[in-house]
Image (tube, rainbow, N blue to C red):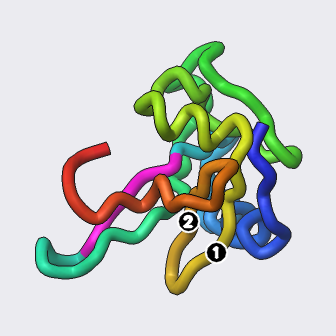
Amino acid sequence: MMTITSAAAEMIRDFVQRSGVRNPVVYLGQASSSPSEPRQLYPLVYPSSRFLWLTTTAEGIPFVARLLYPRDVRRAMKRGVLDVSGKGLVLKDANGTVVLPRYHGAL
């Protein structure tokens, strides 16, 4: 599973705590406030019941299973690094290439 930096783990745990969701699971989602602004990667918090058994845990944080992401994201989630960048998160693959957030196209 990916390495999660302490800063990223702290940010995710803060989002989970503020959500108030019981039995939470985290999905890495992208958002921007307008089409002209770059996307940011955020931990979206959902009840685990929405994903049934399709969850996994990394660094004690429950995530939506990798199979629900595109192939390049799945690879990065297996061997990459999740860190904080600016206001959001950044997911890099094993080579250090930024996989998320994507600046064009959909996840």
At which x and y percent is residue 60?
87, 45
Q: Who is closer to the viewer here, 76 or 17?
A: 76
Q: Nearer the viewer, residue 92 or 57?
A: 92
Q: Residue furthest front?
A: 95
Q: Answer left or right for 40 relative to 2.
A: left
Q: Main secondary structure of the magenta part?
A: strand
Q: Quadrant of the C terminus?
A: top left
Q: In this orientation, which residue lies closer to the viewer: 41 or 24?
A: 41
Identify which amino acid the numbered label 2 is placed on.
Answer: Val
Disc 1: CA contacts within 10 A as few (<14), some (14-19) or many (>=20) = many
Q: Secondary structure at mark 2?
A: strand
Q: Are marks 2 and 1 in contact (CB under 8 Å)?
A: yes
The residue that label 2 is drawn on is 90
Provide the residue designation for mark 1.
84
Q: Position of residue 15 (x, y in %)?
A: 62, 65
Q: Which mark is residue 23?
A: none
Residue type at tag 1? Val
User: Residue 30: x percent and y percent?
Assistant: 37, 58
The stretch in magenta equals 28-32
Identify the residue at image location x=40%, y=70%: 40
Image height of 51 relative to 11, above or below: above
